[in-house]
Image (cartoon, rainbow, N blue to C red):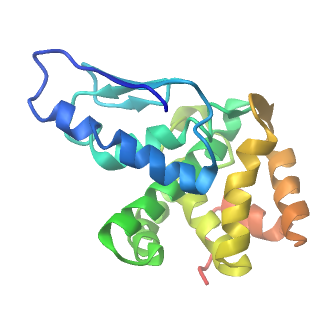
Amino acid sequence: GVPLTYWVNRAARPQVLRDLRVAPAAMAWLEERLGPYPFDTFGMVVVDSDSGMETQTMVTLGDTDYTTSAAVVLHELAHQWYGDTVTPSDWRDMWMNEGMTMYLQGMWQADQEGRPVAEVMDEWATFEDEERASAGPPADYDPRSFGAGNIYYGPALMWHELRERIGDAEFLELLRAWPQANLNANADRDGYLAWVEEQTGLELTSFFDAWLIGETTPPRG
């Protein structure tokens, strides 16, 4: 019931439109995990760049193989919940958007490839080590590295570790509940983490501190 539109320059690569048409399947996959798509329409516009941006209801994608790939389409679509439905109060906490959206991308990739998401996380762990070393911890804001990979891979691994600790059912319930509890609202880091502790009944201060502001990647379970 959600109208989908694709805006592509006639001069774009021939396969671009075919690539974008993964959107209905990606939306259905996300709705199973996050609840109904939170807006009335969804579209993608392909522009002359090499990046993607989760613009609310009309995602902007660069005209490259990577930025129009199924994984990126899924990632930017997931931002309609994590980023566009609930948005950080301060861009210092952009990891709140990118960490969970990246983890959803990892879940989707694992699902499409028929393998455990833990295997995807194992592959991403190398990127996490490199990004933390070069750009710092994901929640220790440095304007010189704004938007670097440290806000993607580290928090994604963190959420996977929490999932391993509390189990699939409780984690997937958290995944779905956060955007629903903050429809069209802003949230900050303290509120987000306190909410997770309240929902799980766990004291997670040292866990979150290690992953979000620690100088080195924490040991993984």
All told, the count of numbered labels is 0
Q: In the picture provided, is 125 more to the left or to the right than 182?
A: left
**Rendered view: 115 above or below 5:** below
Question: Of 221 and 86, which appears nearest the observer?
Answer: 86
Extreme residue in the bottom direction: 221
Q: Is residue 136 visible?
A: no
**Rendered view: 66 above or below 136:** above
Quarter of the image where one finds residue 122: bottom left
Q: Residue at x 13, y 22 (%)?
A: 12
Q: Residue at x 46, y 49 (%)?
A: 28
Extreme residue in the front direction: 1
**Rendered view: 75 above or below 56:** below
Q: In the picture provided, is 35 more to the left or to the right than 127?
A: right
Query: What x and y, as percent, mark residue 130?
Result: 44, 60
Q: Residue at x 68, y 79 (%)?
A: 167
Q: In the picture provided, is 92 more to the left or to the right than 68?
A: right
Q: Is residue 74 visible?
A: yes
Quarter of the image where one finds residue 217: bottom right
Query: What x and y, as percent, mark residue 85?
Result: 67, 33
Quarter of the image where one finds residue 200: bottom right
Query: What x and y, as percent, mark residue 209?
Result: 77, 62
**Rendered view: 198 above or below 115:** above
Q: Quadrant of the C terminus?
A: bottom right
Q: Residue at x 64, y 62 (%)?
A: 215
Query: What x and y, as percent, mark residue 176?
Result: 68, 54
Question: Of 136 and 128, which appears nearest the observer?
Answer: 128
